[in-house]
Image (tube, rainbow, N blue to C red):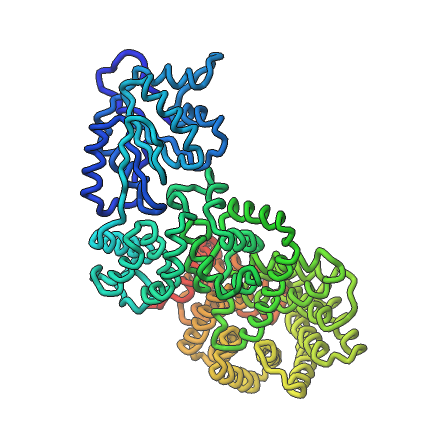
Amino acid sequence: MRRPFRSGPPSAVPAPAPGNLPAELNRFVGRDDELAALTHHLGESRLVTVVGVGGVGKTRLALKAADALKKRYCDGIWVAELAALRDPELLEHALVEALGLTDHSSRLTRQVLVGQLATRQLLLVIDGFEQLVDACATLVRELLCRAPELRVLAVGRRPLRVDGELTFSLAPMTETDAVRLFTERAAAVLPGPPVTSTSPGPAPADARSAAVQELCRRLDGIPLALELAAGRLHVLSIEQILDRVGDRFRVLTDGRRGAPPRHQTLRTAIGWSHELCTPAERLLWARLSVFAGPFDLEAAEYVCGGPELPDEEVLDVLAELISQSLVVREETPAGTRYRMLDTVRAYGAEWLEALEDTERMRRRHRDWYMGLATWYELDWFSPRQADVAAGTESALPNLRAALELCLESPEEAHLGQHLAGTLWFYWAGCGRLTEGRHWLGRALALDTPYDESRLKALWVLGYVAVLQGDSTAAVGALHECREEAARTGNALARAYAVHRLGCQALLTDDMPRAERLLRSALDAYRELGELNSNVLMGQVELAMALVFQGDLEAAVALCEEVREICEDSGERWTRAYALYVLAYAAWTRDAHAEARALTAESITIHHGFNDLVGLVLAVELMALVTASEGDPAEAAVLQGAATRIWESVGPPLFGSGFFGAPRALCERRASEALGTERYAAYEGEGLGLSMSAAAARALAERR
């Protein structure tokens, strides 16, 4: 809130001078001689206009000089930013607003300005007047004539040409100052230890290195160009910037940028920012509005590229939008991602609609993310599994947007079924069962033929429902999938349906049926040449069925084989379940140290993927191992922690006596050792642990 002009009797303690001069957000670098000269001129002339090429640093220098002189003006320093103003009729109102003046009389606005300023001793900074130069010149001349103590510091690309005006032409920075500025801004963009000039990142510690000096020279020492070049270190090395600086130089010197981007805020001047963009930047801005969340460079190139904007030029244009704070770059577990603020995206969406290109772009966006999901599904069975999980998490808002588009039109419902089914690894493996159930249910509610997409969505829905403990929904979807797959001759879909029916039998304690169905599915997979995480999971589930029937040796052999395949392929998600079975087998042999090590690795993997089903089972097994090692109190804490995790999974232990056996045995042993009340107290402590705290507690080394 602006402080109004001071009024009333003076107080014992002088109030600070009024004004709205903004504080510095980053350090002012260099320009010592120019700053001294400008402050001197302001002492000699009532109107000083700082002029220069766009991006040369006019505004920053003017505000720095004004701040240095603030003690001279008892009525303060007031800044009027006019860059967003288009209507000359509103110029006087804008100055009234900037000065914090209040007047409810019927006087004309110009009369208000003249009357209020007539006896004031203040400095008025007018910034960004180029589009209103005639009206601004007329008004400034009148104010100076009617207010003898008023001084004006104007900032623009050309002079006002008013009597008494002193024009201060600001030249580019000297090489020394340019190197200092670039180095400091580079360090702010990517903080950390110095890197070599051949690596992406900030400039070298030696700011006078040959590469930095050459870059500063080729950018003519223009501060905005240097800061934008430093911003490019997000995506390019210094040498790469030098290779492309020819195009950048032309962009920076043809006057299209206008006022420096750091003087434009998205809240108050988004339209002005749009006007400062080149046609290519405006086009990319509009097209990027179809992204619902973070996106990577490859997505932007595919979705937004085209005849008007070749995909090989998207990088350069995107970098320009980043430099103007219209696109934000951020580091995520999935790697470098870009995103737009909601207000920026909304403005771009309106522009895209005006271009009548929204539907085409939405479909290109959908096609990219369908392809990405398909690639991720294949890559899930690889050493990149953790990267796939992180990438899918990052892409989730865009995947949702793609699903929404698919489900808007009945004729494209099969695409939604395909996409929702393809993401099975994320729904089941990364703790997104509820959301997966939502999309699968919506997709399957639409009437489509029983093609491959619908059958896949059915078995995935059945799988998700099994893991949620919803046997009715699971059996319904899986039986429908099996029958229709048999009718249409889709052997692979039938194998998946049989597999998940076996999983459902496993979790409902029908071990003979589970063994029969799982063996049948595994035989079909082998015949079809199918090998992936699902197939390995079927082998682990068969091992579980054998364990619960007392055939521990066969179960261990199956899981050792799975572990070996996982080591060869880099697969970790299924490996965690195999380790769970191997840990249980070790516990039965009283090999507690081995059981703890295996369970700890299983917990680590499950927690990394956010697989709550696997995590809670492993935590409960760790509780049993802990009790068996003679620490009933800690076992009770882990029991409580597991109870809380179950609240996020579904029905505890799926209602299974077999899967519930470790918990029941642990509770009996720990409560006998502690007594009912103490056991309940320790269990309550575990109930208060977050998921991450529970995992950390389970992984803590025992003394």
Of residues 58 and 196, the one nearer the viewer is 58
Figure label count = 0
Residue at coordinates 38% horizontally, 41% vertically from top-left?
263
Give the quadrant of residue 80. top left
Establish if 315 lies above or below 283: below
Screen quadrant of the C terminus: bottom left
Name the residue furthest right. 487
Residue 138 point in image, percent of width and height: 40, 25
- Percent x, y for residue 168? 26, 37
Is 326 displayed left or right of 422 in the figure?
left
Can the viewer see residue 1 in this picture? no
Image location (x, y in percent) of residue 456: 69, 71
Left or right: 40 as drawn, with respect to 618: left
Regarding residue 401, the answer to whether it shows in the image is yes
Q: Residue at x 42, y 15 (%)?
A: 111
Q: 336 or 673: nearer the eye?
A: 336
The quarter in which the N terminus is drawn is: top left
> Of 608 and 66, which appears nearest the observer?
66
Q: How far across and down, in percent of the image, does residue 595 sit?
A: 44, 76
Q: Quadrant of residue 163?
A: top left
Classify residue 159 as left or right of residue 92.
left
